[in-house]
Amino acid sequence: MNSFAEHSAPYLLLLIFLACLSVARTGGLDNRHTGTELWENPAPVLLDTALAGPVRGLASDFDVLHVFSIYQAANLEQKRQGSTGLWPVMAAYLQRAQEMDPRFFDVYRLSGALLAYDAKMPHLAVQLLEKGTAQLENNWELPFIAGFLTYDQLRDNRLAYSLMKEASIRPDAPPLAVHLAARFLARDEGNAAGIAFLQAMIELLPEGYHAGLKQRISELQRSAK
Amino acid sequence: MLRSDSTRAIFELSRFTLIEIIQSRVFRLLVGGTLLIPLIAVIIASLFMADIGKVYLDVVLSGAHFASMVFTLFIAASLLAKDIDQRICYIILSAPMKRHHYILARYGGLSIAFAILAAALTITAYIGGYFYIGSLAELYQSGFSALMIPMMFFYIFFQYLSLISVAVFFFSWATGTAEILLFTSSVMLFSWAFPPVLAALQTEELASQTPVFLRQLIEVIYQFLPHLNGSNFALSIAHSLEINGRDLLLYTLEHSAYAGISLVLALLLFKRRDL
Amino acid sequence: MELIDISKEYIQGEPVLSNVEYSLDRKQIYGLLGINGAGKSTLIKIIVGLVRASSGKVEEKDASLLSFLPEHPYLPVDMTALQVVSFACRMRGEPDIETARTLLAAVGLKQEAWEKKIRTFSKGMCQRTAIAYCLAGNPGWMILDEPMSGLDAMGRAHILELLKQYHNRGCGLFMCSHIVTDIARLCDHVCIMARGKIRETMPIKEHSMAEAELMEQRLLFWSGNASL
């Protein structure tokens, strides 16, 4: 009996602790399962920058990963409750990602789609895209997307024109961009061109991130009829 | 003759140090662990939409920083701390070995061991990048070039050579493990955090929010630290941007000079201390 | 070797050594005896150059190799005994591996331990390895701080014999120990240290127990007399 206690007790204890751990972990404590109210705004920029040190690129990557998670959580919350307070948080992480690595293209891609159409924050999206336009001097897509958002959401044709003009003079801008820009600014063709552009953007994004863009396409289709 | 004796002493202790490190389990684990870095980089990069090549390089760079810090703190500083704490330096100095040869040779051995680690990291990251990122469509590569990986390690190597020389400097006067590890890790922490903070403070918005004395204090401390200011280089490399030759030269010069100064100070202090 | 007026203060006003004067002849074996805190280790460290004297100096008449065995010698734990001793051989201009093997055999370290990491060694095995390290390169002087520490009775007899052999080949020995009998068995002269000074030197002629007892009495006398 003594020998049994001596040799088996540690294994028995180990089993008990393992059982307790699995009960605790499957009992709903794990953040991944709740999906709401997990997100806070990023830490103050100076602290974040100090923590990131020489690996600002990775800090920016993690901010974008946060954006993915917040987007999923926001959609879930919107479905359940009809509204969500997570969009400003997502916007804050996108801004932080842009500050950490101003040349990170995914940030602008997400701004042009999720921030503008899902979060309904086109002003901020255009602002971020304009910052990107200044950073990526040879990229025509960013001013083009910014121009489209300005035309489609902010209804500022003048700014849209200047942004699209900027896009069209940048290296490697395809003739399509120039053509589309002209069509946007010809009011009668705006809707069809807008739909074409949004569909092109859908091509660039994974399926999980299409909701806002598809909604806008159907709005444009309705108004065209 | 004297010259050849000096060279032999430095060569022999460098070799001894290198073997000592290579035979230690922590170094072997670290080198083995580097094989995981490209794998982790591939896993994280695959979560992203388009800039997969850029994310791969970001993760590899961070992994390299982590491995280099582990090396500096747990291999370089620990080895030097043991020399003092366990009085291993008594037996080595009685080889016979002059004190300045001892400092130079220990640093030499540590640098070569670090170069081996950096080479292992470069090779594994290069292979991972070449096969994984190279197999993706151009859109997802985000301008990735496998040649950027050796370039990235070149930067990291020089930064940490400076930090290792700082550990040697602390060894030259510290009383033992606690002091050497404390001071080296503090320098490492400040070197990590200060350069990007100072860069951020250049912006008007942040500058107006930070008291002037605090900015000046940070600036003064910063001048005493080795600059882990690889963030600009690192971001440029991650985006496959060209870095000009002048910057490259200045960067190499800065870190070589910093390591040189730390070592000379270490020689002067170690020569005078009672063991 | 001449010790000329050596004094040492680690903290100002608290002398550890005061005006130590002594002359060492390589043809003799010297023992240094003293209780804890007498200043033995500091004196030895000054002789081998690990500590700088506050005043005075050590003068060596010939530039022969001076080898040092510290008290509780720690060796790099991830190296093998053979690698450590080979390093000493190479540093002292001798062919490394063969000489290292000869030395490890001479100190009585079992052959199967030669290529094992020092991490796995007992205290006695470490001590033997350190002694082999010390013997490399046929040193002109060996300064030994507690050389028998960690060794069993057989080991002590073996090492004493080995040290005598090296002395007969022309190596000067200066040994510091707490163990009076070891000094009595090996040394030709003993210096008794107390409170930072060499208080008395005695020749050892017969290497007998009686001489050991006498040394112990003198040591207690000098160390116990606080007014000195």
Image (spheres, coloured by chain):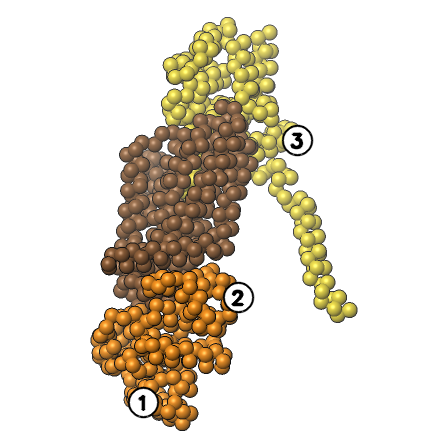
Q: Nearer the viewer, mark 3 or mark 1?
A: 1
Q: CA distance from mark 1 to mark 2?
A: 42 Å
The chain painted brown is: B
Same chain shared by disc 3 and disc 1? no
Q: Tell me the yellow chain.
A: A
> Which amino acid lies under the numbered mark 2 shown in the image of this protein?
Glu
Residues beneath discs 2 and 3 located on the same chain: no
Q: Colour of chain C?
A: orange
- The residue where tag 1 is placed is C203
Residue B118, placed above or below residue A10: above
Q: Is residue B90 visible?
A: no
> Which mark is first along the chain, 2 or 1?
2
Residue projecting furthest to the top = A188
Q: Amino acid at mark 3?
A: Arg
Q: Callout 3: few (<14), some (14-19), or many (20+) C-alpha neighbours within 10 Å?
A: few
Residue at the image position 59 percent from the left and 11 percent from the top = A221
- Callouts 1 and 2 close, C-beta under 8 Å: no
Q: Nearer the viewer, mark 1 or mark 2?
A: 2
Instruction: Tell me which chain the residue with mark 1 is part of.
Output: C
Query: Is the residue under label 1 in contact with that under label 3 (CB below 8 Å)?
Result: no
Q: Position of residue A72 (x, y in %)?
A: 60, 31
| Residue matched to label 3 | A80
Q: Secondary structure at mark 2?
A: helix
Query: Measuring 52% from the left and 13% from the top, which residue is drawn there?
Result: A194
Q: Horizontal placement of C55 versus B193: left or right? A: left
The amino acid on which the numbered mark 1 sits, given as a three-letter code, is Pro
Q: Position of residue B41 (x, y in %)?
A: 51, 37
Q: Secondary structure at mark 3?
A: helix
